[in-house]
Amino acid sequence: ESFEISLNSAKDDLPLFTLTMSGSKVNHHGLEGDDANSEMSLVVGDFRMVSTAYGRTLESYRTILGLAPSSSTSLLTVKYSKGTNAVRSCNVGGADKLECEACAEIVLSPMRFVHIHSQVFTLIEYVTEGVFGAIAASVASSAAAAAMEVAKSSQTGERLFYIVASGSNLVVPQAAYSEKHFSFHSGNFEAHYRAFEGDVGSEAQVSLMDVSMNCSQNMQMVSAPVNMSVSVKLKPPFTQITEDERATKVEMSISRIRLLVARCHYAQMMHTIDYNIGEQDNFLREEKAHAVKDNTKEEKPTGATVNSIIKNLTHAGVENVEVVKRMYINFNIQELSVELCGDTTDDPIMSLAAVKAHILMKLLPDEKQTKAYVTMHDLVCDDRRVGSVDHTFRRMVG
């Protein structure tokens, strides 16, 4: 009736994330006469994922995935198929699965998801490299004891994850320790996450329907719900390629959107880019833990002991490579309107509108720079102040 899984770090064997499930049913079986293929199904009545209490994340953000505010119960259904024959029976929403060695179907009822960028990528690495990479490894008494074997394991074959959800809420904090956040609500959510073999990397294709946006002050920031698609391409940090090729690339396409931006929102957007999206610290450990880790670097082990190997591992149990990755975010918007407001979104000052808008943002942490390139067609700019309603010339640019 109740089941809890603790995802422990391979570095210190302390929890990173905890999965809590109730009303769960798990079924695992291999295909008859075929040891290379197997299927596992999981049905959960209530599901939530919580980050560790050892970290420095605000309590309100620790539940990374859980119930949406409007729901009293949740349901998670997972089907994981491994092996060529088992993959054939896996429904992945029409995606290509010919090269897949394993795939998973994940269906969520209305959920709330908190996006702290470094924590999300830590979890992705843990699941793809740590969990699935350790399936073939022998079971050890603790994550730290298994670290040496996990570090030697490598991924073979593509893995595809198909995720479907309805009525989802996404919270994007300004920082893991800040109460300010942006909140997105989506009517329908569909995503394909594909982890490729070897050093190719991974990619995600996300489709969102009826998306609305609010800030932590409950100000509406989108005049009407919009539809959008998002594509994300990731390269392994250790790949021997240029910085531009290694950068995380995000493509976001929107047909029509009217944004309402108050004076406080601009600073919040910039801070969110710096202290959430661009932040390297995952805030899953206390500051004292980092100090202890740094002090232990002074020790010089003479052999390949477990402790010396653990120091060079990530939380997932794979070799740690300190690489500061760039991120390129490309927005393609058919019809864009931005209404600049005063203290609230009910106090319009000026509006900008254009068609075929292209906005490229380059986050360059290695150069400590953020660059933006904007291209707009048929740009118009209007005076939207209440006091200028009767003015003859309200259009300033057109």
Image (cartoon, helix red, strand yellow):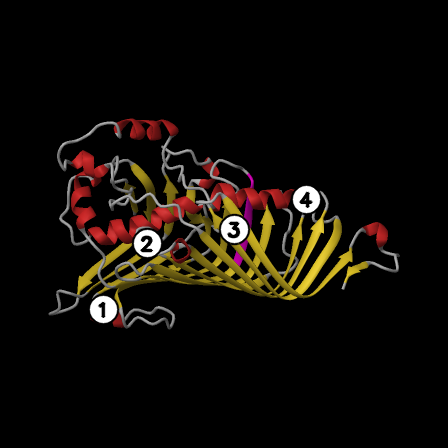
Mark 3 crowdedness (10 Å alpha carbons): few <14, some 14-19, many ≥20? few
Q: What's the amino acid at mark 1?
A: Ala
| Dominant secondary-structure state across the stretch colored magenta | strand
Q: Which mark is residue 70?
A: 3
Callout 3 touching callout 2 (CB < 8 Å): no
Q: Position of residue 113 (x, y in %)?
A: 45, 49
Residue under the image location 52 percent in, 37 percent down: 178
Q: Nearer the viewer, mark 1 or mark 4?
A: 4
Residue under the image location 34 percent in, 72 percent down: 96
Q: Nearer the viewer, mark 4 or mark 3?
A: 4
Query: Is residue 175 something that shows in the picture?
Result: yes
The residue stretch that appears in magenta: 180-186
Mark 2 crowdedness (10 Å alpha carbons): few <14, some 14-19, many ≥20? some
Is tag 1's residue or tag 3's residue first in the polypeptide sequence?
3
Seen in the picture, residue 291 relative to 222 is either above or below; the reply is above
Q: Which mark is residue 263?
A: 4
Which type of secondary structure does the marked residue at label 3 adopt? Answer: loop
Mark 4 crowdedness (10 Å alpha carbons): few <14, some 14-19, many ≥20? few
Residue under the image location 13 percent in, 69 percent down: 32
Callout 2 touching callout 4 (CB < 8 Å): no
Is tag 1's residue or tag 4's residue first in the polypeptide sequence?
1
Q: Which residue is mark 2?
A: 236
Q: Quadrant of residue 315?
A: top left
Q: Nearer the viewer, mark 1 or mark 2?
A: 2
Is tag 1's residue or tag 2's residue first in the polypeptide sequence?
1
Callout 1 touching callout 3 (CB < 8 Å): no
Q: Position of residue 195 (x, y in %)?
A: 31, 60
Q: Which residue is mark 1?
A: 86
